[in-house]
Amino acid sequence: MLKPTSDELLKLEGTCEEYWQEAHSKFEEDEEFYELEFGKRLDIPEEFKAEALVVPTGRDHVDSFVDHIDIANARVRVNKLSVSDISAERAEMMRKFYTGLIYRTNVEADISPWRVAAKHYALHGIAVMGTFWDADRWPDKPKQKEGESEENYNIRLDEWRNQTHESLPIVLQAINPRAMLLDPSYGARRFVFEKHPMLIYDIRNKWPGWQNPQGKRADEEAEYIKYWDRDYRCEWIDKEPLLNGGVVKHNYGFIPYVVIESGLGNISSDGKPEKRYVGLLRYINDLLIAESRVFSLNDLVLKKGALPWYTMSGENAGKVTEIIQRFGVVNPLPEGVVLKEMAPQVPAEALKRHMFIISDYISQHAAPRSLRGLSEEGVRSMVDRRLIASQAELRFAYSAEA
């Protein structure tokens, strides 16, 4: 493979950014609906917008999908290089190593990257995992001090070797698809870009030799870009090459990203990524908006019409400024004023039914009824009840592993 230049790669990055722009916009929209931030789309009358309610149906569907993705029982297989016993032993040793790496990552990470990737998979229709060498996890080899004896230096070397035996400088990460620019060409993927905003403070600590040419403060951000292909890599801070020589050769032997597709999209004739990478919510956004709009309007109507109201008649009715509706309080009225209570327009049964609907939303979103020892509607046999309970338990499956 020919070695590209930094300028060529930056032009390629601009082309990929344009190609992925619409897909990234769709990813942001996916997150808007998952985070229930689409209240402004409900088209509620202006005077009632503050009382609009967004129901969590879309989020619950994504989370249920994620709950059904088994991230706790990874199956690792390593191909043998030959039919010999040595090759079989090597393959088994590497299998155990990879299994241990997965376990270590789950234990050390704040949140399992497989859980994060599963969420991206269900929400955006694509999950991206990265495998990288992290030099900060590898202890520096000690240098012999001036005048230090060989014996003392060897002792320090032995301590360093013991530390290296306990260190594994390989990091597995789940990367948000919004940060990725994949090769738009049809067929095998030949290169990948990854982009993130990064604090100047973190950049200075990670690369002490970086000169900060724009003189940014430690609390400001810069754009960090990585490029990888099978043979070369390059990194930039605000479009300025970060590595000595710009583009450098790496020894990975592969592109250190794994892309997993949901299969819910379509590889269309025009090759648009926004059609290929599709999550659960992509084509039901209008329905989610309609559901929340109807629920909000129903709640407003019930709220406005459920309480009793009054009429006053008599020549001194205009003198009444307040009616206190508290138990045991008597409202003195001016002479000749008659107060008449009017029946609420909304029957009590409608309020009760609305309360049950709200209760169902809360139950589906937080803890299903079967997890709280309550029967599900329509469930009669113990087999059905056990099946429903086992499905409900998936809501807390990740917490059990954590």
Image: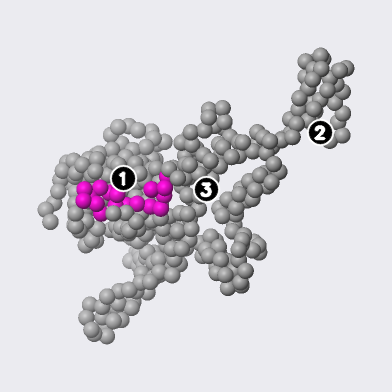
- Which percent across, then down, holds residue 126? 34, 54
Q: Residue at x 74, y 34 (%)?
A: 343
Q: CA distance from mark 1 to mark 3?
A: 24 Å
Q: Quadrant of residue 129?
A: bottom left
Q: Is residue 255 left or right of residue 135?
A: left
**Tag nearer the camera, 1 or 3:** 3
Region rendered in magenta: 267-285
What residue is pinned by disc 2? 326
- Which percent across, then down, holds residue 120? 39, 53
The answer to if 9 sits in the magenta stretch is no
What residue is pinned by disc 3? 56
Question: What SS does tag 2 mark?
Answer: loop
| Kind of residue at disc 2 | Arg
Q: Earlier in the sequence, mark 2 or mark 1?
A: 1
| Kind of residue at disc 1 | Ala
Majority secondary structure of magenta residues: loop
Q: CA distance from mark 2 to mark 1?
A: 57 Å
- Which percent across, then down, holds residue 49? 54, 32
